[in-house]
Image (tube, rainbow, N blue to C red):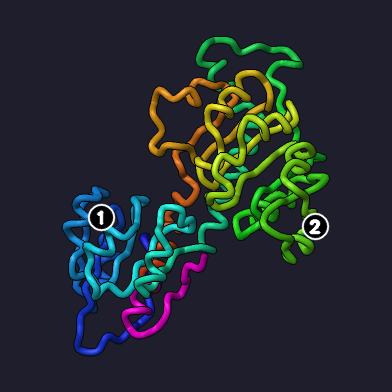
């Protein structure tokens, strides 16, 4: 049975706020809850032109797409716009400075994504380390061999794990690894984190993490500092037996350099839930590699995640329109 979002009971007085929901691909019962006290317009698809046509006059926007959220959208909405909430944790596609300049509240859904994204990261780790994709290809090609050293993979127990970005997702990945008997956990980021000490994780610089880790998880935001952080030079620092997992943003990895590293054995394998661009071209060379697991940005694609993320998005918007603050405000 489909559960309903836990939307708080907000009071708007005699006014019915005007809301725009930028995508219709959510259960109708979710929108019906908004319509009890608000006038709601729902865009039929994810087309930017339709969003721009529909947004004028909106008091609040539930931004459910990954399209650019910028000054053009805010201009089209009008000066009455008070609040926008995205249904994502990462905000690299949002011009946050424009919101601050115009004093428009901005919310997102940070903590709710930690669990499902960490789950995908662990799945990609195992699939890449144990050669799931390559093994499936061998079966399809009639190349299944019955010998002891056929299709040997990498072991997780006893390994050194490196996590780039020890925020909510990185910390949850560390928790998920507790049952795998790893030897060490390293992390890197802007600064040391008290939570890391409790988790038994050691702060190191990026080169040290890459040189010493058997599994490298990317869980940091995409910023001007992290774009193409993993490139030909940094990939060369990694072990030939190492596995790279990216559940953050595709732009953090130089994709042609990753393809080259996977082809020539610079690293053992990779598991990617994110890539650039998205959707990925079906002819992209990543999809030709037996040692690369690629899934289409499924990190939060569960029924519970959708429910939780919509709930926070709606409460972010309604709270501001009722005179409060977003329940999950975005802060740079």
* Residue at mark 2 to residue at mark 1: CA–CA distance: 44 Å
Left or right placement of residue 14 versus residue 154 in this view: left
Q: Is residue 158 magenta?
A: no
With respect to residue 172, does 243 lie above or below?
above
Secondary structure type for disc 2:
loop
Location of mark 1 (residue): 24
Name the quadrant containing residue 15.
bottom left
- Residue appearing at x 73%, y 26% in the figure: 240
Quarter of the image for residue 167 reads bottom right
Above or below for 306 versus 60:
above
User: What is the magenta segment's predominant secondary structure?
Assistant: loop
Q: Judge by depth and name the residue closer to the eye, 297 or 238.
A: 238
The residue pinned by badge 2 equals 200
Q: Residue at x 27, y 55 (%)?
A: 23
Identify whether 154 is placed above or below 101.
above
Quadrant for the N terminus, please.
bottom left
Residue 294 visible, this angle: yes
Query: What residue lies at 75% left-to-right and 45% top-to-bottom?
Result: 180
SS at circle 1: loop
Q: Position of residue 37 (x, y in %)?
A: 23, 79
Is 252 situated above or below 308?
A: above
Q: Is residue 41 left or right of residue 155?
A: left
Residue 36 percent location from the top left of the image = 23, 76
């Amino acid at each position: 049975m489909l559960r309903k979002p836990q939307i708080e009971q907000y009071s708007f007085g005699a006014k019915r706020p005007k809301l725009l929901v930028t995508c219709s691909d959510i259960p109708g019962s979710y929108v019906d809850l908004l319509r009890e006290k608000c006038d709601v317009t729902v865009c039929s698809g994810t087309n930017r032109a339709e969003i721009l046509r529909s947004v004028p006059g909106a008091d609040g926007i539930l931004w459910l797409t990954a399209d650019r959220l910028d000054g053009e959208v805010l201009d089209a909405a009008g000066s009455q716009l008070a609040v926008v909430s995205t249904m994502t944790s990462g905000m690299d596609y949002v011009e946050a400075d424009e919101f601050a300049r115009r004093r428009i509240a901005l919310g997102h859904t940070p903590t709710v994504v930690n669990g499902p994204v960490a789950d995908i990261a662990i799945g990609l780790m195992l699939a890449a380390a144990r050669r799931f994709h390559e093994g499936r290809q061998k079966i399809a090609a009639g190349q299944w061999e019955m010998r002891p050293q056929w299709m040997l993979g990498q072991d997780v127990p006893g390994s050194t794990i490196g996590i780039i970005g020890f925020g909510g997702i990185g910390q949850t990945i560390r928790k998920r690894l507790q049952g795998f008997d790893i030897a060490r956990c390293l992390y890197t980021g802007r600064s040391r984190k008290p939570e890391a000490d409790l988790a038994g994780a050691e702060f190191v610089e990026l080169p040290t993490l890459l040189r010493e880790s058997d599994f490298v998880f990317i869980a940091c935001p995409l910023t001007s500092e992290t774009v193409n952080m993993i490139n030909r030079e940094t990939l060369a620092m990694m072990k030939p037996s190492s596995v790279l997992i990216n559940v953050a943003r595709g732009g953090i990895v130089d994709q042609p350099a990753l393809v080259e590293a996977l082809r020539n054995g610079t690293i053992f394998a990779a598991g990617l839930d994110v890539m650039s661009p998205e959707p990925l071209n079906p002819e992209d060379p990543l999809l030709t590699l037996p040692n690369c697991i690629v899934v289409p940005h499924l990190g939060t694609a569960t029924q519970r995640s959708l429910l939780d993320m919509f709930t926070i998005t709606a409460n972010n918007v309604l709270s501001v329109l009722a005179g409060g603050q977003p329940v999950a405000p975005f802060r740079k």
